[in-house]
Image: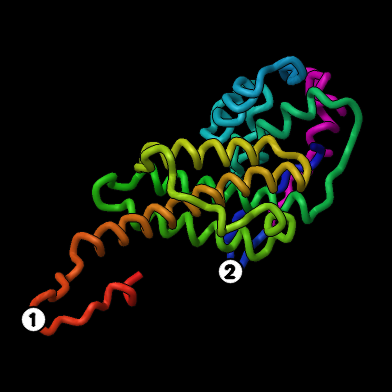
Amino acid sequence: MKKISIVLATLIAPVILMADMDRCVSCHGVDFEKKALGVSKIVKGMSEAEIKASLDGYKKGIGGAMKDLMIAEVNLGVDTDAMAADVYTETLIAGFDEPNDEFIFQKRLSVKTLHKLKMNIKKSDPKKDMGKIASQIKSMAFTMYIYDDLLKEKIDFKKMKPSVEKLNIKTILQRVEKVKTCVDHSFAEKEIVKCRVDFVNLAGELTQNKAKSIRAKQKINKLPIYTGEGAVDISKYLK
């Protein structure tokens, strides 16, 4: 991907800050095969983890000969997971291919929103905040569904069932991280839709789990039916 969009956004009033990857390739080469300004490490051949470590260093204000220039590139709220994925993928793909701005916006908005959710889950109290986290996931999933026509084609709410595994804060965090990684490594709309399907399914499982729990409590707390003298059989109305 030849353009990295840095999005500082909310669902109500998104604001886009663009860091064009053509600025990156002007120094690093189209396939990141050059030493930037003749002094940097060659990015092509580095692993994604190595690229992310370098970006994280710049974000903290540390780095090598290109530090002063790169700090300005990554210190605008950029998600280094996504940026590293973009750069790494471009080192593997020959040539220059610019995605459209709408795709870039949607990807960055998804990444920032999932990143914020991930941080909220990490800071949450497993005993007290399960309901709040579940509500956030359901709200995000609903927003994804409403505004994504491709997603609507792949989701069938009638087929959603309670989760097979126990969904607690730890397992929910793992699944959210998996979705975020999936989005980070998506470079086409149809790829991001697959990630969103997994997220909506998580929301569906949480919804079905809650419904199952409510039905179980209702069954336990159901008032006894009077069966004494003069009782009327109302069982057929309770089915």
**Quadrant, the C terminus:** bottom left
Is 86 placed left or right of 182 in the picture? right
Q: Camera-side residue: 105 or 147?
A: 147
- Circle 1: residue type: Glu
Regarding residue 97, the answer to whether it shows in the image is yes
Please tell me which residue is depicted at 57% across the width and 41% down the height of the picture: 179
25 left or right, relative to 11: right
Mark 2 closeness class: few <14, some 14–19, many ≥20 residues within 10 Å:
few
Q: Identify the residue at image location x=72%, y=56%.
A: 153
Examine the rendered structure and indicate whether residue 171 appears above or below residue 88: below
Q: Secondary structure at mark 2?
A: loop
Looking at the rendering, the stretch of residues picked out in magenta corresponds to 16-38
Q: Position of residue 220 (x, y in %)?
A: 20, 60
Q: Which residue is mark 2?
A: 12
User: Mark 1 sits on what residue?
Assistant: 229
Q: Residue at x 68, y 35 (%)?
A: 185
